Image (cartoon, rainbow, N blue to C red):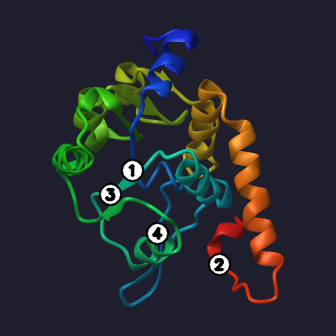
Amino acid sequence: MTTLTRDEYEARLRGLKLLATDVDGVLTDGSIAYTGGDAETKIFNVRDGSAVYIARAIGLPVLVVTARGSQAVARRFSELPVLGLCQNTFDKVTACVEAEAGLGIGPDESLFLGDDLVDLPAIRRAGLGVAVADAHPRVLAEADWILTTRGGRGALRELVDDVVEARGLWDEVLADYETRQAQKSSPASEPDASAE
């Protein structure tokens, strides 16, 4: 159950300087399909990819931390402007501490978005602990805020949209899209993943 009112949630979003997120169950629906050998398939929501670009446009670094290792995850985040990708990282708190130190900020200025028990220490430590709508009941019970979106369905986008709204930055976000579209329209431009 959330412990914050909407006004308190938005106030914390305004002071945020790092957004850290889990992968499986947050940026995916938690499913893993093995396609033969060591290959696996994961499905990501394009809206979450757009959220990373929006976060960059408003100066909010995104750190991706997952307890598993996956070539599919490495491929996905090679296409997106994240601060870092930490795979095979069961100790998510340490990953966040290191990122905060690099940015010169404290835990009160960071957010962790998760869904399962492995995320609880990072959710508890962050200045703002957020859960996806279908998170484990223990995570839902301890999160400061619960999103309305399930994992893999655009939960990160909901969260980043909330940050933009809280900070009153929609004009800046739309201007960033217009600038990138104009650059893509020029004959010398090359396609990239920011079209999400």
Res 6 → quadrant:
top right
Task: Give the Cα separation between the discs numbered 4 and 3.
Answer: 12 Å
Task: Give the Cα separation between the discs numbered 4 and 2.
Answer: 13 Å
The disc at residue 192 is 2
Task: Give the Cα separation between the discs numbered 4 and 1.
Answer: 13 Å
Residue 67's spot in the image, x, y percent?
27, 58
Vertical comparison of 134 with 4: above or below: below
Tag nearer the camera, 4 or 2: 2
Question: Earlier along the polypeptide chain: callout 4 or callout 2?
Answer: 4
Which amino acid does the dot numbered 2 rest on?
Asp
Residue occupying the point 74% across, 57% down:
177
Question: Earlier along the polypeptide chain: callout 2 or callout 1?
Answer: 1
Residue occupying the point 30% across, 41% down:
119
Question: The C terminus is located in which quarter?
Answer: bottom right
The residue at which mark 4 appears reads as 77
Residue 101's spot in the image, x, y percent?
18, 46
Helix, strand or loop at mark 2: loop
Q: Are marks 1 and 3 in contact (CB under 8 Å)?
A: yes
The disc at residue 131 is none
Which amino acid does the dot numbered 4 rest on?
Phe
Task: Give the Cα separation between the discs numbered 2 and 3.
Answer: 25 Å
